[in-house]
Image (cartoon, rainbow, N blue to C red):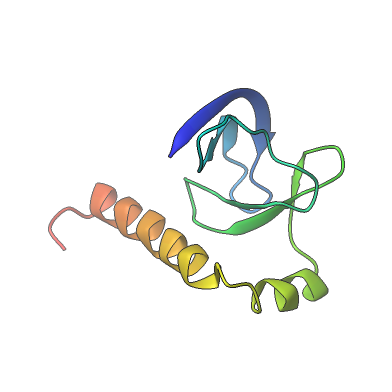
Amino acid sequence: MKTATDLKNCCPYCLEQTDAVFYFGDHPRLPSPRDISVCAHCGEWSIFGYDLRLREPTTLELAEISRYRVLPRLVNARKSVRQLRLEAFCPEI
């Protein structure tokens, strides 16, 4: 996983400010409209709009996501973020 910088954004769920995106692959790539994002702060899924601002997915988009082959990876990413947050705030668990 690598980082592409200079893309300031805000999670529509937790309002956490971001200034970078992580991507997979060999070549840096900024997101495209309708790409999925997983918030590194709260773990929620967002969608990049046509202006590349994050927004909550529509009901139809959530249904589409549920059919994606990458769904298990998205679910694991959400669980990992939430587990890391839990460990950071409640290390005795």
Q: Where is 62 relative to 1, above or below?
A: below
Q: Is residue 87 left or right of residue 11?
A: left
Q: Where is 72 relative to 13, above or below?
A: below
Screen quadrant of the N terminus: top left
Most extreme residue toward the right, as rendered? 50
Which of 3/49 is in front?
3
Which of 83/14 is in front?
83
Q: Who's the residue at 81% across and 75% down the image?
A: 60
Q: Who's the residue at 59% across and 33% down the image?
A: 17
Q: Position of residue 12 (x, y in %)?
A: 69, 49
Q: Position of residue 85 (x, y in %)?
A: 34, 51
Q: Position of residue 48 (x, y in %)?
A: 75, 47
Most extreme residue toward the top, as rendered? 6
Q: Who's the residue at 46% across and 61% down the image?
A: 78
Q: Position of residue 83 (x, y in %)?
A: 32, 59
Q: Say which quarter of the image contains residue 51.
A: top right
Q: Say which quarter of the image contains residue 10.
A: top right
